[in-house]
Image: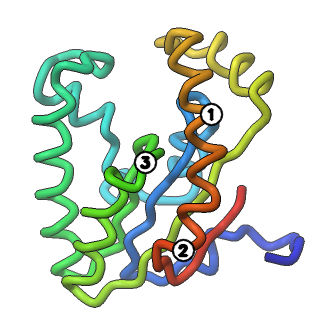
Amino acid sequence: MEASQQDPATAIPADALVVLIGPAASGKSTWAASRFAPSQILSSDAYRQLVADDASDQGATRDAFRLLHLVARARLERGLLTVIDATNLTPSARRPLLALAGRFGRPSVAVLFHAPLEVVFERNARRARSVPADVVRRHHDLMDASISDVRVEGYRLILDV
């Protein structure tokens, strides 16, 4: 993608599934909140909060994602822009989302957040709810592998932010 002064989010189709991909503290939620309506953003942390009263409760992840996928399906079926705010660092996390977009004939957009590790650590330290350093490092390593995978997974558009 060529460098441009225009916000890359303006290229996202109005009925798209947008999959944010990046380590914890890489800026996904902040970026999404500044560009999309709250109703358009399906956050894994928000769904953990709903099912467990604790956004960081990893034991609630299965239930949280079950609900997140259910809501994503309903939105995509209606042709509504749907932004998935989660790390989405593995093909197995992204595959069911891509299948949903395909099922309803919606374009899929991957948005990659690949900040240097030092920047991610700095942002993580400033968060109200920080993630353990070993998790941040593992996420960052997974992001390196994700970049090449994402490029062959079938997204209509890939944005690097």
Amino acid type, label 3:
Thr
Residue occupying the point 60% across, 48% down: 145
User: Where does label 2 land, which residue?
Assistant: 152
When the figure is inspected, residue 125 is found, relative to residue 81, above or below; the finding is: above
Q: CA distance from mark 1 to mark 3?
A: 11 Å
Q: Secondary structure at mark 2?
A: loop
Earlier residue among tags 3 and 2: 3
The image quadrant that residue 22 belongs to is top right
Q: Position of residue 131 (x, y in %)?
A: 50, 14
Q: Position of residue 138 (x, y in %)?
A: 55, 25
Amino acid type, label 2:
Val
Amino acid type, label 1:
Asp
User: Where does label 1 land, which residue?
Assistant: 141
Color encoding of the figure: rainbow
Q: Which mark is residue 90?
A: 3
Q: Are marks 3 and 2 in contact (CB under 8 Å)?
A: no
Q: Position of residue 55 (x, y in %)?
A: 29, 22
**In terms of depth relative to the viewer, which is nearer, 70 or 94?**
94
